[in-house]
Image (spheres, rainbow, N blue to C red):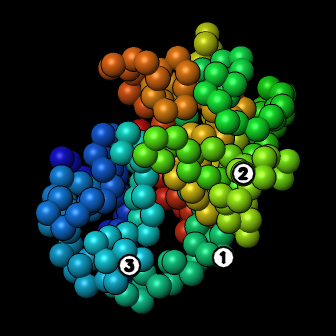
């Protein structure tokens, strides 16, 4: 497993930004799990283990990206830096940017079931549009999520925290043949948020075996065409050239 460091710690910013490869988990499942991005990073920066994070096993990890996703991950090296970054995140002052290559599939959400109705036009996407929802876990083993809105069923609404609305800004950058390239950005995030929101508006990501109806039944599909390529921390921007 190779780790590319984008930002080294310094006297003013005691955190790391590094690239997680595709198909590597961000964090361990248990204390014995060493086959993950964070475990590898700890070999390079053992002081990470001095940080008390939201989960004891995750130390200074500020956020995760999905196993199948490549791109930037932010990790604090001391407790003060961790606490400050978590506070910035709560204030929506950390923005994460993603690049997605998607298919356009008519009624993709209907084929996957349990998505509320939504209508977004391509012209809107070219200008950039905010997609907003609550989220709930869905399906066997709670491996998927579904957006929930005010006119969703009472059963769905009872499964969400209505204090938190999750927003994904989605902008269509380019389309060629059957592929659509999107820039997406979020501040606060829920599991699979961007992937699910793109699927909801019928532009699921290529290689997404959870939210793309053309990929679900493939035993070995395409790689997930989804990259966390930029992060903005209180006005300071870091970019991964991929």
The residue beneath circle 3 is 53
In this rendering, position of residue 227 left or right of residue 67: right
Q: Report the residue at 32% width, 70% height from top.
A: 58
CA distance for labels 3 and 1: 18 Å
Residue 233 found in image quarter: bottom right
Q: Residues within 10 Å of mark 2 (few under 14, many from 20)?
A: few
Point out which mark residue 91 bears.
1
Lateral position of residue 184 relative to residue 241, left or right:
right
- Secondary element type, mark 2: helix
Q: Residue at x 30, y 40 (%)?
A: 23
Q: Nearer the viewer, residue 155 or 109?
A: 155
In the displayed structure, would residue 106 be above or below residue 171?
Answer: above
| Numbered label attached to residue 155 | 2
Which labelled disc corresponds to residue 119? Answer: none
Does 128 sit left or right of 232 as displayed?
right
Dot 2 or dot 3: first in sequence order is: 3
């Amino acid at each position: 497993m190779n780790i590319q460091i984008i930002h080294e710690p310094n006297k003013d910013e005691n955190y790391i930004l590094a690239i997680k490869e595709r198909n590597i988990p961000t964090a361990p499942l248990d204390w014995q799990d060493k086959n993950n991005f964070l475990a590898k990073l700890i070999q390079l920066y053992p002081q990470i283990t001095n940080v008390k994070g939201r989960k004891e096993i995750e130390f200074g990890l500020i956020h995760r990206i999905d196993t199948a996703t490549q791109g930037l991950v932010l990790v604090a090296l001391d407790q003060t830096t961790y606490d400050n970054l978590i506070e910035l995140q709560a204030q929506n002052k950390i923005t994460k940017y993603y690049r997605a290559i998607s298919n356009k599939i008519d009624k993709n959400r209907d084929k996957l079931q349990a998505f509320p109705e939504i209508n977004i036009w391509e012209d809107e996407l070219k200008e950039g549009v905010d997609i907003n929802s609550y989220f709930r876990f869905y399906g066997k083993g709670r491996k998927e999520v579904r957006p929930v809105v005010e006119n969703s069923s009472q059963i769905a609404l009872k499964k969400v925290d209505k204090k938190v609305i999750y927003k994904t800004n989605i902008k269509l950058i380019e389309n060629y043949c059957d592929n659509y390239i999107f820039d997406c950005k979020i501040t606060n995030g829920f599991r699979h948020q961007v992937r699910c929101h793109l699927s909801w508006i019928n532009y699921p990501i290529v290689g997404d075996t959870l939210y793309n109806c053309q990929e679900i039944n493939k035993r070995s599909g395409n790689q997930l065409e989804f990259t966390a390529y930029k992060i903005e921390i209180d006005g300071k921007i870091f970019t991964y050239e991929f």
